[in-house]
Every structure is written in structure tokens, then in C-alpha cells.
Amino acid sequence: MTYESLVYGFVFLPLCLAAYQIVPQRWRRRVLLVFSYLFFWLISRNLIVYLLGTTVFVHCIGIWLEWLKSEQKTELASADRSEKKKIKGIYQQKSRRVLAFGVLALLGILAYLKYYNFFVSNVTGILGNVLPFTLEQKKILMPIGISFYTLQAIGYMADVYWGKIRAEGKLEKTALFLAFFPQIMEGPICRYSDTSDTLYEGRPLNMDNLTSGYIRIFWGLFKKKVIADRLAIAVGMIFSNYTSYSGVVIAAGAIAYTIQLYMEFSGCMDIIIGSGELFGIRLPENFRQPFCAQSAAEFWRRWHISLGTWFKTYIFYPVSMSSPVKKWNQYGRKHLGKYITMLGTSAIALFPVWICNGLWHGARWSYIFYGMYYFTLILLGIAVEPVRDRILNTFHISDQSVWLKFVRIAKTWVIIFAGELFFRADGLRAGISMFRSIFTDFDLNALTDGSLFNLGLGRADMIAIAVGCVVVAVVGSVKERGTDVRKSLFRRPVFVRWALCYALMLAVIVVSAYGDGYQTIDMIYAGF
């Protein structure tokens, strides 16, 4: 059962909504918890033990950290001024050890399940002839969503350690926070403070939430079914047989995959956030018109926002404020100057973020390369920023010029398409070969000789994709100007409002599920 399946939309969700509304308010969060574990069990079966174990473990770590804070307060209340600093140091050290134990335990499980075979294959390939023992790959079953709920769990423990939140005293609340069924498979990766105010309230269902939530669900289905699932056919053919195509087709494949990935992932986010909205539960947004970005850094502030926020909060800031970085800043300012010091600090803080970003997506060198690709480009952007500003000032060019914005957006598109080519390629070597062919075998005749119509898509499929992309682009443009599309829709006359809603539903029901070019495609990010 996946979010776009008929079972989820017409059986699971209605049953959950009915049970949620029928029971008393104080029991509603338990209904959500039961259905969340049912959802997880239907997908991962016995692997639910990982989620259960993680939940109990994280809950206990949170209670432990909270207990240490309470003990510290008790001792400080009766201690002399001269002893207080020592007491704070002792308890800070204890708390740090508890947090490190919790984080390392969760990361250890994730690393074993996700990266053990990758580690074995690389060690065997490099040191296989000199190792005194044999490393063998194992058949490891990995529960769905482990990369998402592991980061959520680590964030929860860190926030308790930093004192940003109090540890949750009720196990059922911790369990619901980690397992809430709309987000367990693909995120968004929430902080406890993001959802705690609405997740546990048990608000009664109301028509506004139901209407708004279902409109967003159908909008997500439109993006996935009409556009992403159709594009997946052509993308699969190009990337599976890249040696058979010229560079122009490879470039088209990179663009098509980027569109597919966006429509797939943002569409699933619409279904997820819409599902939460049905119950009056607010989940954080994960996309904000990423193709309007004017730089690689801005793109990642708009794409997979919750993952970027997590890395910024729990890796970038702690590294930036760490003792080694502070020492580097002091040394750099004295001996190397402000510019070099700033660049070095940025590199030190950004490197772990982007190596972790690559590894988070999976155990492949192409993913690691993808992370290093953006690390290099973002660091390069920081390095040339003073030069760029000087050039603009010299030629009296406004930083807000429309033509300059278009140039920057076009440049960012090239960066995005090139990055996604390596991300989708079947290994780093394949990605390099495909990228090279764009420059060595770029034959424009492929655009007119019918090659693009031999990729499993007919004219009707291409029209459906093109129209769908235009509709999504128009809606995105309206949102970029600050308009809430759904609120604006609700202010329209009843006839217009329902005509547009029915058009959206018919597009999902009729256009998406019919035609030779349609097939159901598994959710991409569920595999991460």
C-alpha cells in the first residue's frame, strides 16, 4: 500500500477518518497511532520491530536526559556559588555522553542496514587479495522509511539535550511523533515542535479541512500520475540504454528525469501534507518552487526543505560553533585574512553536510559524488560572491535586474539537470559516460528524426505531460508571487470552484490511468 494507491485513498484513509471521528477526543491520537502502525506493518510486516525498538529507545533517552536536567537543578539549588560551575560541567558531560550513546546507536543500526554491503564490496574490491579473512555480502531487509524516522529521532534527542523542548513523558506520544502514517514513508522530516501542537489535540473533523486536504491530495496525484509516472517510461529507456542514444537525447533524459523526480516527490508531499490536513494536523512544507532558484544554494533552500533544515540545524550549526572551528577563526583572522578565514570556515561546516546528504540518499558512489558536486558548487558560489558584487558595482548593474534573474535561473537549471543526471545514472562511471556524450555526440537531428517518439511514449502521452507541466508551472508561478492558491480558489464563485475541482479529479481518474504510456511507478524517495 502506497500513498497513491486506491487502497490508501478509498479504504485506509476513510476507515481512519471514521474511527478518528467516532471515538472521544482523548482517544483520537491512539486511533492515529493504531492506524500508523497498521500502515507500517502492511508495508514492512515483521520489520516493524525496528520502529518499535527505535521508539522505546528514543523515549528512554529523552527521559534520561530530562532526568539529568532535573538532578542538575536540584544540586544547583543547594550548592555554593563556587561549586555551581563544577556541577554544571559534570552534568553537561553526562548529558553529552547520553546523547552520543543515543545518536551512535541509531546511526549504527542505519549504517549496518543501509551501508554494510556497500562497505564490503568496496573493501573486497580494494583489499580483497591481502585480507586474511573473507567478507561476504548479506541479504539485509531494511524497513521502509528508516532514513526518515531515524533523523527525526536524532533531532528529537538533540532538541531535548539543548533544552529546546521537554522530553515527552507519554510513550504513545513519542510513538505517534515517529510513526505518523502520512509521513513515515517519505517525510517531511519533522522536528517535535513542528507537529506537537496539532498532532495530539484530536481536533474533530471539519468540512474546511476535509475539502482543502482532499484538493491537495488530488493535486499531488495529478503531478505523480499524469506527469511523473508517464515520464518514468522514457527516462528508464534512456538511462538503461544510454550507449544507444546521442548526447541530445541524454540531455533530454536528464531534463525529463529532473521533472519526473520533482513531480513524483512534490506530488507525494502534497498527498502526505493533504492527508495530515484532513485531521487538522499541520506538517511542514517540503518544496517552495525550487525551479525559481537563482543559485545552487537557493535551490537547496527550496528543495527537500525538511532535509536541508535538519542538516543545517544538527550538523552545520554545531560544526560552525565547535571548538576547532573557533580556533581556526582566531588563527585565520590573525594570519590569513577575513576572506580566506570565511572560506575555510564555510568549507569545514559544509563538507560534512554534503557528504551526509549524499550518503543519506543511498550506498552508491554516484550519490556521494552528487553530494560533493553541490558542496563544490556552493563553496565556489561563496568564493566568487565578492568578485561578482564588485563586477556588478563597476558596471552599475542592479542585483534585482529582471534579465540578470533570468540568467541566474537558467544557470541554476543547468546545474540542477547535470546533478540529476549523475543522481539517476546507474553508477558513477555511467554518469560520467553520459555527461561526456552531451559534449562529444550532441546531434540535433535526434530532435527531428523521430528518436524522441521511440521512448515508449506516444503523442497523447507527450501532450498529457506537456499540458500537465504547464498547469503545474502556472500554479507555481502564482504561488511564487505570494498567492495561496487554495484560499484563492475558495473565494471564487461556487460554479468556478467546483468546476476546477472536478476537472482536477477527472484528470487524475481519466487521463492518468489510461493509455499505452501509463504504468504505476514505485515512489522514488521511499527507497531512500
Image (spheres, rainbow, N blue to C red):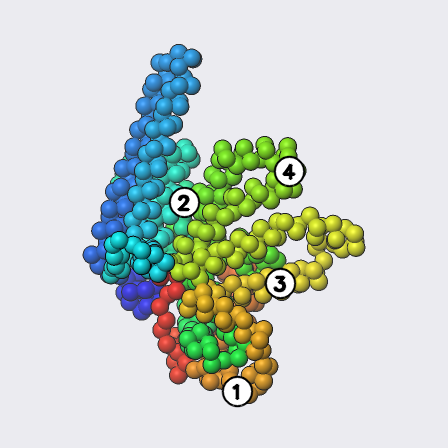
Left or right: residue 99 versus residue 132 is right
* CA separation in Å, label 1 and label 2: 50 Å
SS for callout 4? loop
Against 512, residue 32 (above or below) is: above
- Quadrant of the drawing holding the C terminus: bottom left
Q: Which circle's residue, 1 or 4, is located before the other in the chain?
A: 4
Q: Position of residue 155 (x, y in %)?
A: 39, 43
Q: Which circle's residue, 2 or 3, is located before the other in the chain?
A: 2
Q: Which residue is mark 2?
A: 191
Which residue is drawn at the image coordinates 51% and 63% (left, top)?
A: 419
Q: Amino acid at mark 2?
A: Arg
Q: Which circle's residue, 1 or 2, is located before the other in the chain?
A: 2
Closer to the camera, 357 or 401?
A: 357
* CA separation in Å, label 3 and label 1: 29 Å
Q: Which residue is mark 3?
A: 411
Q: Are marks 2 and 3 in contact (CB under 8 Å)?
A: no
Closer to the camera, 175 or 406?
A: 406
Q: Are marks 4 and 2 in contact (CB under 8 Å)?
A: no
